[in-house]
């Protein structure tokens, strides 16, 4: 099922000793690029958690934020460096006394300083770790569902556009035989007139050979056959279960190559108009596909 690379997911969990919430946001990206915003005490979990994220997505720039509240720092395997806190408060109190100022410590700001917390080299509480992993997976589930919902809308839009591309390709295919016939007739007429003016001998067989060579250069039937195959593959890829954003992007590039060749070779005003319409619609498809994983 196609999935958009743009999505949002959230989960919340509250227990007796802690509360936490995860938020997952993503935008387009060629590869999976994960940015973490989590407490410093949990940085060592990023590698393990990244493996979990890769089960839910393969492309995009993903930002994962964790808001964690715990009632005891021991749950995180960290403790307050009390000697350092005492030393800092003593120095600031002495400075305030010397200047004749009253000093009332703001403990909220003091305790928010990461340098005052000491890592006890132990893992966070196992129950907290389990709860955090469950919260991460729940947020990722919500994120994946939002991406699939948007991806389904994008896929429906693409199917409609590909149907229009197939109609334009068919119109080009119907126009080409008429163009070739007109080009052959005009070329034969010009050659006959030129030979008559110089009094040269006219050979029908030779004329047919030359006309066949020249009109063959204008024939785009092979390009149209390959183009039709690419459009069919686009539909099949959209209907596949796997997330094939890269394959869709590649097929669109190949379709651009074939339609460009058709426009260059055909040398016809009507075909040129159809080619421009085709390329305009195909560019819209490419913009949509670049949102798919």
Image (tube, rainbow, N blue to C red):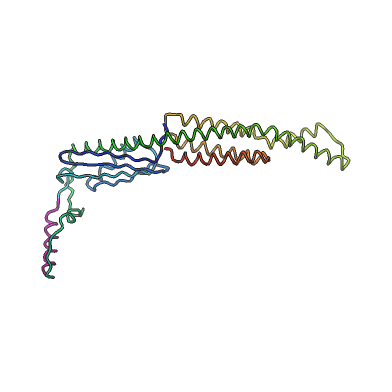
Residue 246 or residue 97, whichever sits in front: 97
Q: In this view, does 215 lie to the left or right of 55?
A: right
Span colored in magenta: 80-98
Residue at horizontal 15 percent and vertical 40 percent from the top: 17
Q: In which quarter of the image is the C terminus?
A: top left
Location of the N terminus (image quadrant): top left
Q: Residue at coordinates 28% horizontally, 35% vertically from top-left?
A: 138
Main SS of residues in magenta: helix
Q: Position of residue 261 (x, y in %)?
A: 62, 39
Decide: is 12 above or below 242. below
In percent of the image, x 43 and y 42: which residue is there?
A: 30
Position of residue 161 measured from the top left corner of the image (x, y, whole percent): 52, 35
Relative height, residue 112 to residue 19 (above, below):
below
In the displayed structure image, the side of residue 123 where residue 252 appears, left or right:
right
Residue 179 at x, y = what percent?
70, 35
In the image, residue 94 lies in the stretch drawn in magenta: yes
**Residue at the image point whose x is 35% and y is 34% from the top:** 145
Residue nearer the viewer, 193 or 278: 278
In the rendered view, would you say 114 is above or below 50?
Answer: below
């Amino acid at each position: 099922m196609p999935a958009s690379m743009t999505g949002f997911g959230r989960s919340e969990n509250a227990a007796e000793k802690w509360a936490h919430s995860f938020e997952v946001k993503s935008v387009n990206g060629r590869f999976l690029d994960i940015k973490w915003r989590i407490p410093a005490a949990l940085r060592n979990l990023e590698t393990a958690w990244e493996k979990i994220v890769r089960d839910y997505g393969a492309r995009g720039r993903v930002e994962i934020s964790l808001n964690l509240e715990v009632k005891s720092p021991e749950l995180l395997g960290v403790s307050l460096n009390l000697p350092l806190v005492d030393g800092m408060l003593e120095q600031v109190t002495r400075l305030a006394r010397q200047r004749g100022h009253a000093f009332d410590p703001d403990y909220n700001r003091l305790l928010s300083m990461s340098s005052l917390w000491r890592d006890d080299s132990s893992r966070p509480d196992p129950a907290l770790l389990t709860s955090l992993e469950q919260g991460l997976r729940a947020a990722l589930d919500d994120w994946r569902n939002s991406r699939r919902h948007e991806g389904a809308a994008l896929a429906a839009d693409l199917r409609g556009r590909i149907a229009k591309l197939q109609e334009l390709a068919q119109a080009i295919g119907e126009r080409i035989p008429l163009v070739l016939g007109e080009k052959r007739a005009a070329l034969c007429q010009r050659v006959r007139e030129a030979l008559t003016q110089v009094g040269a001998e006219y050979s029908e067989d030779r004329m047919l050979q030359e006309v066949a060579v020249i009109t063959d250069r204008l024939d785009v039937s092979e390009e149209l056959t390959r183009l039709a195959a690419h459009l069919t593959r686009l539909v099949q890829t959209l209907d596949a279960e796997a997330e094939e954003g890269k394959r869709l992007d590649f097929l669109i590039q190949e379709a651009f190559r074939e339609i460009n060749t058709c426009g260059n070779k055909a040398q016809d005003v009507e075909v040129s108009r159809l080619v421009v319409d085709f390329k305009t619609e195909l560019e819209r498809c490419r913009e949509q596909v670049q949102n798919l994983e």
